[in-house]
Image (cartoon, rainbow, N blue to C red):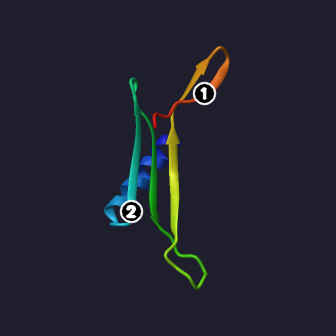
Amino acid sequence: MQAVASQLVDALREAGALTLSLVAESAWGVVGHTAVSPVIVAHPDGGWLGMGPISVVFAGVNGRALLCLHP
């Protein structure tokens, strides 16, 4: 799935359609990323943005999966 998400982000960037790109980092390095881009919605107000793909690193502690994002 990681390759598909990175290809989508690359395509948005190349098309000039990447409005915002946020990277989450921790002491371990990059642990997350999300992209925001314009979308077309059949609604008269317009100006909509979509968020995705969202990529995160999960770490297991004591048998539990933890979402590791640094604010």
Q: Residues within 10 Å of mark 2 (few under 14, many from 20)?
A: some
Q: Is residue 41 above or below residue 25?
A: below
Residue lying at the far right of the rendered structure: 63
- The residue that appears at 40% across and 34% down in the rendered structure is 25
Residue lying at the far top of the rendered structure: 62
Q: Secondary structure under badge 2?
A: loop
Q: Secondary structure under badge 1?
A: strand
Q: Are marks 2 and 1 in contact (CB under 8 Å)?
A: no
Q: Where is residue 48 drawn, in percent x and y?
A: 52, 72
Q: Where is residue 61 drawn, in percent x and y?
A: 61, 17
- The residue that appears at 45% across and 59% down in the rendered structure is 36
| Amino acid bearing label 2 | Thr
Q: Which residue is mark 1?
A: 66
- The residue that appears at 61% across and 81% down in the rendered structure is 42
Residue lying at the far bottom of the rendered structure: 44
Q: Who is closer to the viewer here, 25 or 71?
A: 71
Q: Which mark is residue 52?
A: none
Q: Is residue 50 above or below residue 5?
A: below
- Horizontal side of residue 64 vs 33, given as left or right: right
Q: Which residue is mark 2?
A: 19
- Horizontal side of residue 64 vs 41, given as left or right: right
Which is more N-terminal, label 1 or label 2?
2
| Amino acid bearing label 1 | Leu
Q: Residues within 10 Å of mark 1 (few under 14, many from 20)?
A: few
Q: Where is residue 69 drawn, in percent x and y?
A: 49, 34
